[in-house]
Image (cartoon, coloured by chain):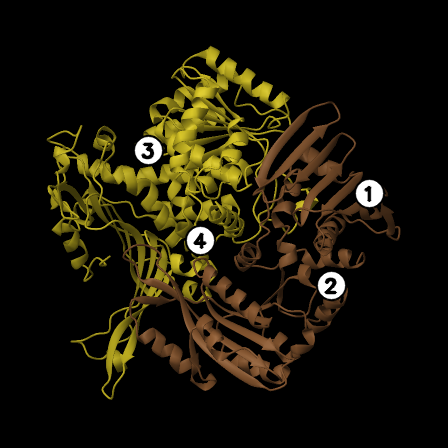
Chain colours: A yellow, B brown
Amino acid sequence: MKKCFRLKRTARLHNVRRKVTSVSNEQNPTNPLREGLSSRAMPQPSNVVIFGASGDLTFRKLIPALYNLAADGDLPAATNIVGFARREKTDESWRTELRDTTAKCSRSGLNDEVWGGFSKRIFYQCSDFTNTEGYRALREKLDAIDAAGGAMGNRLFYLSVSPTDYDLILRMLAESGLNKPRPGAWTRVIVEKPFGTDFATAEALNEAIARAFAERDTFRIDHYLGKETAQNIMVLRFANQIFENQWNNRYIDHVQITSAETLGVEARGPYYEKAGALRDMVQSHLLQLVCLTAMEPPTSLTADAVRDEKAKVVRSLRRLSSEDVAQDIVRGQYAGGAINGKPVPAYRAEERVNPQSMTETYVALKLHIDNWRWHGVPFYMRVGKRLAKGGAEIAVQFKEAPRVLFNADADAPLGPNQLVIRIQPDEGISLRLQCKVPGSVLRIEPVKMDFHYGASFGKQSPEAYERLILDAMSGDATLFARRDEVQEAWKFVDSIENAWHAPDTKSALCEYAAGTWGPKEADDLLARDGHAWRRM
Amino acid sequence: MPTETAVTASFGTPVEIPAIARELKKLWQADQTRTRASLINFAIICEGEDAMRDSSELLERFVRNHSFHALLIGIDPKASETSVQAWINANCYLPKAGAKHVCCEQVTVFVRGKVRELLPNLLFSQLDYDLPLTLWWRCECPEQIDSEIWRWVDRLIFDSGAWKNPRAQFAAMRTALSINDSAHTSSRTILGDLNWVRTGNLRQAVAQMYDTPDGAARIRKLRSLSISHASGSRTTALLFLGWFAALLGWSNGQAPARIEAATGVANRVAFTTPEGGKVACELSESSGAPIHRVVLVHDDVSITVDHPTGAEYLNLTLAWKDGRFARHLVPADSTDLADILDEELSRGSRHGIYLRALAAAEALM
């Protein structure tokens, strides 16, 4: 237990230091004892209401995240959790279920004493999402908790439900008045991705949210942005003068972004059949990585300053014509193959997947960002399931040195410098340089400078959900997607989907064997430009 | 005089001082399955062989959480003959199955006799290039340190809780580091007083009680503050009291009056708030954790923070005058020196208000 405790405490410190500069504490500007203790905005006590309380995400991620925050002393003491779901449960039975899964899923294990105090603040409201009475009962429960010296009326609603229920719940929250904050308090909502399935549905969802909550109180969660390495992209770029000077089309040849999985669709067949790799990964995670890589320095680290710059990147993505889509985007679907020495089935043979499915499990794209910084620099992205290896990274390839002196031999040119930001696993950064091989003859070989988070810091990072929930309680939306970002991203993705599914130009679906690096056509996409995918 | 054999067994391979760099290189070349990790130069200066052995064990424990080039220097200034011995070693761990071992190298030097003359070069010559220097000054003898050394230290770690004469030691430190007023130092050196880190979670816990707008208003109307500390932890308690005084702008309007109480020695002092109110503060000594009870009394609520002996969590109790009552658990500060040092090494910045708290505490020493 001693070791476990030590890890928790150091993780908390780490937590405090993650924010690169101080954040103004708008919520609580006057607690003088906070000076020097923390550089992040302090969360306020609140009642966290989880819709979808009996769902997998609640059990495996949300409650363990809240528990870890409590165990680390980061959760305001008067925070309460109220679960809202259809299944019949009591406060006590829900607590018992949560205890078991939290013990399994919490990164710090489970301390009985901490759980004892934490679980007393967990409540359950059984109701159908359509039932007005259920919302009235929820309101009474929250009022009673507040009256007993609870969360001062602050309410954080977490929609951990199927997107099809968003509109209904938001409407019922508004009708019951639960969305309206009391004087001096706040109400906020966290919405899980996917934020729609295309531009029209995203806009409709945003309209539904806007009818109930102001944009500043809306937190669209993408857990990728809660990852330590994703946050470090901005630090790498804007805290290191040597990189930012070179970060433009004068010095960078191209950028490759990869998100590879060895897993198949597992139990998500029905969802994946509708979504596909483009909607599932590119619209959210990968475009967020493009934004962090390509954005201009924000004027400050406030949520809107950062998100303004990210939104500009999405708006600057060159829209693709049908011809562009055919030429610059490769769709793939995995056939049978082998992963780690074991045979795996084709996508069409997976459970609850249409045997004639035309859904893509792999996409490779070539993008252009039409602004001064990135003019002429292609961004290549690939995302896929059942690939050879799992991992996510951003590789920035610099232009080659001029073809004089050491680079004069056209038959044996020097390789370019390459900066790789590994997001997962084995988070870190590496830089490839050219170096003279020792000896009397001039021979030049590439060498790699490699930084591994694990080897250098050896710290356990908090789960992305811990950071993001705490940020929502603090009112800091920097790591959450804004309405315009989401909608612009959908516009871009829709243009590709529309081209793919236009009646006269049905796009080819290229097959690749499970356990390989995707279809040959994806290699050809880069080969046409004289490039090749980085070996991961 | 210790036997060389006994010391050798603890600290690795014996080497001649001029050969250290060469032998370290051989150490890495001999085994390609190891990754050398190093973010800082971490030097420890301590007195005597027992402290060296203890420090070496700590370094071995830290390798999982911190990457450093370790330089452990033991000194024995009382030895009649001057001599220097050195050893090299690598502390390794396996981050995950199939990965390379991650290792931090350790150079150990034992200097006897003319320590003051030999120390600067021994320290400077063994530092890894370009890495910042964190120095843990683990003994109470500032006269052994040449002022030249201070200019090279990026982070100075010490434990004022272990000092026999903290008032004199703080004064010596102020001189050495050119700390010319209560809050500023012209030195670039970051101070890491483990005695301040020792109350980090306690300060977090207390501050958290005042995060609400009501709470923020309430703290400015504090009526009394009682701090119960362990024997030998008076400096810890004074720094904690100094933290309140510095952040709340209290001035010490009355000289501290020392009174004898039946249970031991109590110290009482009354502070004046910026609004002109009075805060009665009392320090009392009893057995337990370094600070095992803090009681903050307001007009409407009393807040008690208890740290039971050996407990990993603090008990926070709020008792309102109208009978309402609430209890919370928050992580307690470890009383284990290794944990406290580990926490200090995890920091990336200055202790923002340490010098202000220290100035307020020094007035009470």
What is the chain letter for disc 3? A
Residue identifier under label 4: A459
**Between B351 and B311, which is closer to the camera in this rendering?**
B311
Tell me, for residue B166, which label it has, or none.
2
Callout 2: helix, strand or loop? helix
Residue identifier under label 3: A199
Q: Can residue B308 be seen in the rendering of this structure?
A: yes
Residue identifier under label 1: B279
Q: Nearer the viewer, mark 4 or mark 3?
A: 4
Q: Disc 1 versus disc 2: distance between alpha carbons?
A: 26 Å
What is the chain letter for disc 1? B
Q: Nearer the viewer, mark 3 or mark 2?
A: 2
Q: Position of residue B138 (x, y in %)?
A: 61, 67
Q: Tell which circle, 1 or 2, labels the residue nearer the N-terminal end.
A: 2
Residue A306 is left or right of residue A365, and the answer is right
In which image quadrant can residue A533 be found? bottom left
What is the chain letter for disc 4? A
Q: Disc 4 versus disc 3: distance between alpha carbons?
A: 40 Å
Q: Is residue B317 above or below residue A530?
A: above
Name the amino acid, label 4.
Lys
Name the amino acid, label 2.
Pro
In which image quadrant can residue A337 be found? top left
Name the amino acid, label 3.
Phe
